[in-house]
Image: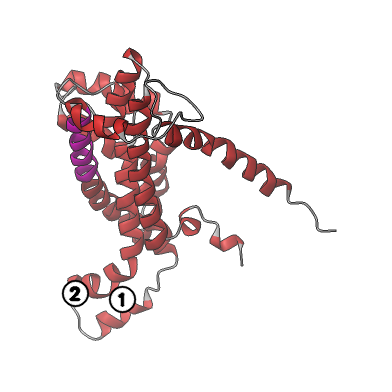
Amino acid sequence: MKKINVLGLITFFVLVLVNLPFLVIIPSSFTAAGYLAFPPEGFSWQWYEMILDRPEFIDSLWFSLKLATVTAILATFLGTLAAFALSKYKFRGSGIINALMLSPLTVPSLIIGISALLFFTRIGIAGTFTGLLLAHMLISIPYVVRLVLTGLSSFDYTLEKAGYMLGAHPLRVFWDITLPLLRPAIVSGMIFSFLTSFDNVTVSLFLVAPDTTTLPLAIFTYMQETLDPLVASISSVVILLSLVFIVLLEKVYGLERLFGLNSQSH
């Protein structure tokens, strides 16, 4: 008899429980009834068509896409530079700096949101796009740092040395050798930053204003007033967008490498 993998079995049931809401939300968004019902009563696209008639959802969607795109670009640039510095240069206090760079991953989002609100209010940028952008960069940069550090851990530095020995300029070596080899990790960090910003609720809740409302918060506000299949349809759109970027992440970098599982399979 094969030995039962208890950890694998527990993981399977946890994944099933985590994904059960999707199996309810998505079918419910196609109901023909005027209220949320599962299983759905009939089939209709009306609730997806109604999204176009709600300007608060359309405006917040474009705002979320703009915010997530800018966050991803800046977080990727700064996170990549930080990862290079931490990996290539060993200096006193580098371990502390590394821990500080990754600390937003361990601090509850609620604490980050409250702290950002207090600090940004003091300097006058609370409720602005700049304040929201800085907060989203704060929670996104650690993912870029982790991914690029993972890529650098298996990087063959002899290729760079060969370029230097052949007389190439350091910028040429970086552009032609280092960057192409690390491109999967960097692009994956950008995708993860985008998803982190686009789906965030807790941190954004403390920093948004009427003209800087993200799509997740628009959905949250709408649910406080009413609960109908329109919520399920707009939530399904968000799920679809997130799945598209997760598939891109898997194709570019691989989820196993992201979570450090490939090393366990050898």
Q: Quadrant of the rendered structure where residue 221 is?
A: top left
Q: Which mark is residue 160?
A: 1
Q: Decide if residue 144 is in sight here.
A: no
Image coordinates of residue 91 in percent, x first then y, are: 36, 54
Q: Which mark is residue 172?
A: 2
Image coordinates of residue 101 in percent, x first then y, are: 36, 43
Q: Which residue appears farthest toward the bottom when viewing the image?
A: 166
Q: Which residues are magenta?
A: 57-71
Q: Which residue does the image show at 44% across and 60% down from the upper left?
A: 254
* Residue 96 vertical position relative to residue 167 in the rendered view, above or below: above
Q: Which residue does the image show at 36% across and 60% down from the upper left?
A: 185
SS at badge 1: helix
SS at badge 2: helix
Tag 1: Cα neighbours inside 10 Å, few (<14), some, or many (≥20)?
Answer: some
Tag 2: Cα neighbours inside 10 Å, few (<14), some, or many (≥20)?
Answer: few
Q: Which residue does the image show at 38% across and 40% down from the upper left?
A: 239
Q: Is residue 208 magenta?
A: no
Left or right: 27, with 67 as reference point: right
Image coordinates of residue 26 in percent, x first then y, are: 43, 36
Left or right: 103, with 221 as reference point: right
Q: Which residue appears farthest toward the right when viewing the image?
A: 1
Q: Which residue does the image show at 29% across and 45% down from the upper left?
A: 194
Left or right: 212, with 76 as reference point: left
Q: Is residue 68 magenta?
A: yes
Q: Are marks 1 and 2 in contact (CB under 8 Å)?
A: no
Amino acid marked by disc 1: Glu
35 or 195, which is in the foreground?
35
Amino acid marked by disc 2: Arg
Q: What's the distance in space between the residues labelled 1 and 2, CA to CA?
A: 10 Å
Q: Main secondary structure of the magenta part?
A: helix
